[in-house]
Image (cartoon, rainbow, N blue to C red):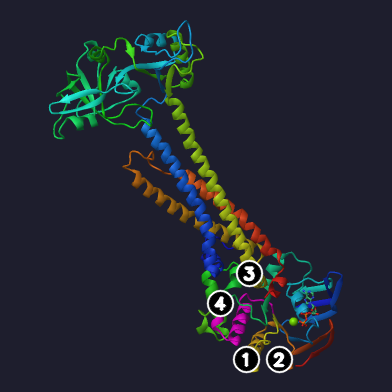
């Protein structure tokens, strides 16, 4: 599903250049649930953002579902993101003036799906994350765990091939973290490829493969199950 | 691609502009004010135009008066300060020499230009009134509102020097009881009985006439007899053909009269004149200037308002950077974002425009009602043609689109990853 070869990425700030990813090689198959671990600043988010086509890389190769991804123009990137990828962020990133169901329906709006159909799909996913009764609520009326579940439902609504989650439990207490991770595992069991960036060992242990980054290099890559 | 008729497109627009309602409303008021000003000002300009047209419709706008005064330059053996009198046969001379003249109506008067008014008596009532000796041709130059079944002086009255008169409305009020119809009644002018044949209403001719409604018109020939005025003429009302320049006619008339009355060609004092054509021209230009001014004011205000909208959207885009990043992450293309922001701009402009037009039209309606029965306000039917309104609306849609591009391009110039990093 994801194939990365000798990928390099530097951030240039004035005269200084920070080499963040130093020759990453990675192959992720369909249906895997992968944790990306590493200390803060090791380049986890950068890698995930490149996989998510939110950021560019300098050299190397990246293929998503056999489509080479390099220097896409924004229109194309938007299309691929919408079609291939679902994002879950640490800070949920829901649109605060939209209700739960409206947030979930938004990717479908950008896909050009008709309004009725969108409502139906969004409600299905809301049900899937156990928040059917909360459809008309604004993010401010939801708990952290509920917000993250709405975010997951939104990420899934466009039926992406890969779900990318950057510290999805980072803002949650451990009980809620477990609930969210269980939801992610369940989604993975239904066949979705999922990448989870985390620095929590318990979260990583729930995945079937753990990749550890250190200073932009993959240190270990362990398949647990 | 989602069409602009999609309910959700509008939901998106309302969602984002509804976030800061106070600011949105203040911005909208900017554009609203512009279109409002444009509608009201150009409506009033049109109303003034109509009003003057209405007032001038009873008189030939291409006309002038000329009268004689005192010379100020010695000439042809005459001393200075010689009093000049126009004569009846000047009319023929002018007609013959100036083909641009369509009508000439000579008039002799008493009780105007410093001469004493005539005393008029009806039974126990009496008063002093201005008396005019007129020819029927006057009606070609100045229409008179004759009512109550009366008529104006006719050729036979002139020929037979009949003792008949047309009185003004105020003259009637002063000499007769309200419930009496004076037509056919007799009044005594300077001790001579005159039969009343008509009553005329006062018509404001925009300062272009010395007539009012406290006067009495008699046949020129009858005037001559009672007041012994001979061939003297008080002044001449002259109308040019529609296509002639009345200012040139005025010059020619004066030149001709100077020759006849042996006035020095450079003597500007000896002849007085008043040119309605020039006045009319000034008023027309004034009305046109007002329309133009309202257009300029309206457009600049609209422009300022629309720029304000662009500015606010720019701020709003900056505030919503994170949100735009989220939208991009979940699949919004640059086009989606651009379209939404431009639609927001156009939508705000149109809403402001429509409300401005409605309020403007309402204010014009109030002005029309308030001035409907005021004769001294030169305003009639203050309206703005629908094509001007549509033009303004399209202009605003165009401006809204163009201005919307600035925040839209700003919004899509931010990379999604940077937008998401924004807090
Ligand atoms: N836009 C950026 N500009 C400059 N430096 C950046 C930028 N984003 C990340 N970095 C730097 O790159 C390194 C890796 O960041 P990141 O991938 O966010 O780490 P992690 O997610 O593992 O904590 C850090 O040192 C960070 O400061
Ligand atoms: Mg990170």
Q: Position of residue B162 (x, y in %)?
A: 20, 14
Q: CA distance from mark 1 to mark 2?
A: 12 Å
Q: For residue A176, which numbered disc appears in the image?
A: 1
Q: Quadrant of the C terminus of chain B?
A: bottom right
Determine whether the beta carbon of the residue marked 4 sits less than 8 angstroms from the nearest atom of ligand 2.
no
According to the image, label 2 marks what residue? A203
Q: Is residue B149 left or right of residue B24?
A: left
From the image, state whether disc 3 or disc 1 is nearer to you.
3
Q: Which residues are magenta?
A: A139-163
Whether marks 3 and 1 lie on the same chain: no
- Which chain hosts label 3? B
Whether marks 4 and 1 lie on the same chain: yes
Is there CB contact under 8 Å for labels 4 and 3? no
Measured along the vertical axis of the image, is residue B346 above or below residue A51? Answer: above
Measured along the vertical axis of the image, is residue B262 above or below residue B306? Answer: above
Q: Is residue B254 left or right of residue B315?
A: left
Q: Position of residue B274 (x, y in %)?
A: 42, 23
Is there CB contact under 8 Å for labels 3 and 2? no
Whether marks 4 and 2 lie on the same chain: yes
- Which chain hosts label 4? A
The crowding category of the residue bearing disc 1, from other C-alpha atoms within 10 Å (few below 14, some 14 to 19, many at least 20), is: some
Whether marks 1 and 2 lie on the same chain: yes
Sequence-first disc among 4 and 1: 4
Residue drawn at the location 51% of the way across and 58% of the way down: B29
């Amino acid at each position: 599903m994801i194939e990365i070869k000798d990928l390099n990425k530097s951030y240039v700030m004035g005269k200084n250049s920070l080499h963040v990813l130093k020759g990453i090689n990675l192959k992720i198959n369909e249906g895997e649930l992968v944790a990306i671990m590493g200390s803060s600043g090791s380049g986890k988010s950068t890698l995930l953002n490149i996989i998510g086509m939110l950021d560019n890389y300098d050299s190397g190769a990246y293929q998503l579902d056999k489509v080479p991804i390099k220097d896409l123009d924004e229109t194309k990137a938007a299309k691929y993101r919408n079609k291939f990828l679902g994002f879950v962020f640490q800070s949920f990133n829901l649109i605060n003036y939209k209700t739960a169901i409206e947030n979930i329906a938004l990717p479908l709006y950008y896909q050009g799906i008709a309004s009725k159909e969108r409502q139906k799909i969004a409600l299905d996913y809301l049900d899937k994350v156990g928040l059917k009764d909360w459809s008309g609520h604004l993010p401010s009326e939801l708990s952290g765990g509920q917000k993250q579940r709405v975010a997951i439902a939104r990420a899934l609504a466009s039926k992406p091939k890969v779900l990318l989650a950057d510290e999805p439990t980072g803002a949650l207490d451990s009980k809620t973290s477990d609930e969210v991770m269980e939801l992610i595992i369940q989604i993975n069991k239904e066949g979705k490829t999922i990448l989870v960036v985390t620095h929590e060992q318990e979260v990583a242990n729930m995945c079937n493969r753990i990749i550890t980054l250190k200073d932009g290099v993959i240190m270990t890559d362990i398949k647990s199950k | 691609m989602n069409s602009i008729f999609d309910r959700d497109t509008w939901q998106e627009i309302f969602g984002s502009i509804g976030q800061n309602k106070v600011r949105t409303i203040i911005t909208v008021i900017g554009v609203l004010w512009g279109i409002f000003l444009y509608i009201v000002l150009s409506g009033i300009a049109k109303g003034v135009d109509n009003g003057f047209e209405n007032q001038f419709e009873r008189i030939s706008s291409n006309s002038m008066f000329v009268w004689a005064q005192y010379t100020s330059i010695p000439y042809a053996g005459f001393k200075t300060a010689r009093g000049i009198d126009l004569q009846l046969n000047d009319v023929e001379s002018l007609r013959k020499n100036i083909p641009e003249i369509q009508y000439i109506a000579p008039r002799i008067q008493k009780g105007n230009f410093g001469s004493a008014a005539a005393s008029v008596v009806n039974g126990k009532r009496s008063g002093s009134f201005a008396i005019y000796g007129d020819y029927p041709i006057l009606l070609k130059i100045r229409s008179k509102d004759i009512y109550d079944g009366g008529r104006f002086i006719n050729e036979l009255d002139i020929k037979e020097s009949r003792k008949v008169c047309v009185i003004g409305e105020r003259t009637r009020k002063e000499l007769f009881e309200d419930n009496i119809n004076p037509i056919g009644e007799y009044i005594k002018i300077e001790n001579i009985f005159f039969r009343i044949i008509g009553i005329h209403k006062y018509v404001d001719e925009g300062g272009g006439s010395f007539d009012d409604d406290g006067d009495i018109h008699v046949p020129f020939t009858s005037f001559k007899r009672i007041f012994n005025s001979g061939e003297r003429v008080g002044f001449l009302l002259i109308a040019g053909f529609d296509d002639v320049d009345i200012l040139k006619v005025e010059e020619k008339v004066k030149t001709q009269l100077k020759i006849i009355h042996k006035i020095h060609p450079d003597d500007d004092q000896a002849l007085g004149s008043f040119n309605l054509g020039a006045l009319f021209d000034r008023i027309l230009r004034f009305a046109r200037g007002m329309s133009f001014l309202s257009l300029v004011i309206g457009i600049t205000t609209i422009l300022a308002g629309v720029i304000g909208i662009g500015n606010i959207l720019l701020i709003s885009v900056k505030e919503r950077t994170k949100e735009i990043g989220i939208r991009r992450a979940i699949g919004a293309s640059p086009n989606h974002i651009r379209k939404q922001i431009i639609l927001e701009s156009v939508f705000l402009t149109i809403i402001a425009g429509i409300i401005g037009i409605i309020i403007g039209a309402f204010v014009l309606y109030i002005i029309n009602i308030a001035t409907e029965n005021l004769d001294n306000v030169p305003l009639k039917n203050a309206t703005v043609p629908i094509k001007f309104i549509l033009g303004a609306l399209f202009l605003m849609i165009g401006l809204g689109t163009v201005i919307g591009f600035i925040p839209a391009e700003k919004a899509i110039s931010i990379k999604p990853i940077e937008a998401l990093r924004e807090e």
